[in-house]
Image: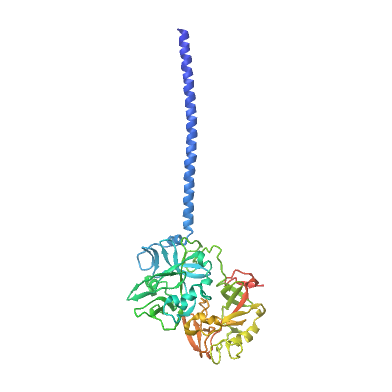
């Protein structure tokens, strides 16, 4: 009996040991399983959290995100409005400035696909429309956009990464009917003038688009006449063959990134141009003179003086000529003679200047491409009527005109081309060419201009 009891105790003990052993194993396995599951699901959570943060960070670097962060959506007159196809600035706005291609633009619209329409803050040139009635065959379109024809796209050539950073902009020659713009036959191109529809939709003269400059509007009145914005902000009928400023519209690709800025004039959004740089609008110091780059081709930059010609502290004003507006270096009474002899010989840096070719053919029937049929080579010239020029400080100076008339075109910073008798004395803004390999230091800003050493 005693032996039987001992056997039973021994068996119970064995069972308890086995149960304990299996419980131990189960607990160990459970702990391992919990750790594995924790690592697995924790890792996945961390992965997706990190991925989400990367997306958020990427979104925060876009121009759209910066705009929405700095603006509340409004239904009032002034501010950022939400539309069916995105967002649009309307009325008096002071925080929609963006810096791109070394110049200032204003943000007009954010499309649903996150591409963003912008317009130059000021005129980028002053042009006549030309003989052709439709925009697609006008001087404006040929000057803005490159096509298979040589010398087209003067403006497009000033934009770095034009294809890489931009998408085509929709436009139409809308017709103004009372306060409504009827827009049909919408078309696309990389660049266009400010449109009548955009001006009206943004509240016209009561908006940020009013800058006290005269400029072309892409649109017509009910009589099918071209329109422009007058200096007082009203929409007016353009004078046939008249010359007005061009405010350029383009569209940045979706999710374009910014490197900083808050959108104000003092602190504009800075577009990340992703290595697409340009010297256009950069400043170069030659001697004691400051020039501005207005064209860049291969190793040569064209420079316009960022001031008027002066003798001592006095502005030197001169007539264009004694007979006509032909740029004639051999005529001692002509502005070309003065610039390439008297003025050129006073420049302490004249030995490093390159020769430039200038178009001198008469512009027939208002078609600017005709001017390139004949060229002249000089060391010093003037800005041409169709050169890129957004200098807001200089005015009332002669352009290099190509006509045998006794009248010459004069540039007015307010956006109007004025005709003056060639015998009238005007300011002089000379242009020169320079091999950019001679530039050794500086960052091209007005405060720290490029320096030739």
Q: Quadrant of residue 89?
A: bottom left
Between 447 and 28, the one nearer to me in the picture:
28
Residue shown at 50%/82% (left/top)? 411
Residue 95 visible, this angle? no
Residue shown at 42%/64% (left/top)? 110
Q: Is residue 125 above or below residue 54?
A: below
Q: Residue 448: x percent and y percent?
A: 60, 70
Q: Residue 254: x percent and y percent?
A: 46, 61
Farthest residue to the left: give it: 178
Between 1 and 446, the one nearer to me in the picture:
1
How many marks can you see? 0
**Quadrant where the C terminus lies?**
bottom right
Q: Quadrant of residue 443?
A: bottom right
Q: Is residue 358 above or below residue 68?
A: below
**Quadrant where the N terminus lies?**
top left
Residue 134 visible, this angle? yes
Farthest residue to the bottom: give it: 323
Q: Is residue 225 above or below residue 156?
A: below
Q: Residue 67: x percent and y percent?
A: 44, 62
Q: Residue 435: x percent and y percent?
A: 63, 74
């Amino acid at each position: 009996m005693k032996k039987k009891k001992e056997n039973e105790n021994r068996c119970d003990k064995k069972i308890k040991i086995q149960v304990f052993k299996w419980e131990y194993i189960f607990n160990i396995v459970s702990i391992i399983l919990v750790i594995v599951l924790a690592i697995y699901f924790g890792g996945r959570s961390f992965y997706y959290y990190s991925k989400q943060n990367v997306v958020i960070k990427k979104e925060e670097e876009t121009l759209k995100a910066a705009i929405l962060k700095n603006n509340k959506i409004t239904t009032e007159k002034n501010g950022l409005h939400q539309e069916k196809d995105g967002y649009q600035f309307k009325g008096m706005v002071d925080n929609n400035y963006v810096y791109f291609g070394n110049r200032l633009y204003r943000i007009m619209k954010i499309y649903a696909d996150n591409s963003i329409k912008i317009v130059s803050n000021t005129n980028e040139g002053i042009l006549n429309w030309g003989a052709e009635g439709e925009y697609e065959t006008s001087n404006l379109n040929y000057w803005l956009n490159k096509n298979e024809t040589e010398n087209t796209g003067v403006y497009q050539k000033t934009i770095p990464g034009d294809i890489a950073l931009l998408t085509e902009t929709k436009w139409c020659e809308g017709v103004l009917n009372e306060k409504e713009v009827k827009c049909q036959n919408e078309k696309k191109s990389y660049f266009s003038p400010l449109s009548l529809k955009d001006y009206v939709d943004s509240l016209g003269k009561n908006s940020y688009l009013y800058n006290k400059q005269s400029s072309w509007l892409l649109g017509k009145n009910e009589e099918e006449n071209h329109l422009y914005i007058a200096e007082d902000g009203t929409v007016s009928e353009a004078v046939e063959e008249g010359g007005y400023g061009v405010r350029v519209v383009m569209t940045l690709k979706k999710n374009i990134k910014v490197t900083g800025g808050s959108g104000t004039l003092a602190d504009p959004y800075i577009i990340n141009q992703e290595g697409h740089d340009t010297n256009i609008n950069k400043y170069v110091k030659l001697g004691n003179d400051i020039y501005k780059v207005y064209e860049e081709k291969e190793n040569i930059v064209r420079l316009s003086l960022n001031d008027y010609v002066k003798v001592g502290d006095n502005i030197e004003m001169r007539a264009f000529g004694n007979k006509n507006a032909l740029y004639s270096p051999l005529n001692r009474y002509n502005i070309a003679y003065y610039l390439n002899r008297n003025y050129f010989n006073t420049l302490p840096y004249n030995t490093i200047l390159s020769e430039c070719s200038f178009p001198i053919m008469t512009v027939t029937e208002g078609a600017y491409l005709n001017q390139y049929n004949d060229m002249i080579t000089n060391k010093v010239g003037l800005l041409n009527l169709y050169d890129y020029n957004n200098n807001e400080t200089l005015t009332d100076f002669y352009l290099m005109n190509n006509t045998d008339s006794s009248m010459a075109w004069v540039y007015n910073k307010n956006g109007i081309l004025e005709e003056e008798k060639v015998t009238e004395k005007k300011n002089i803004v000379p242009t020169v060419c320079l091999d950019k390999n001679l530039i050794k230091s500086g960052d091209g800003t007005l405060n720290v201009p490029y320096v030739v050493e």
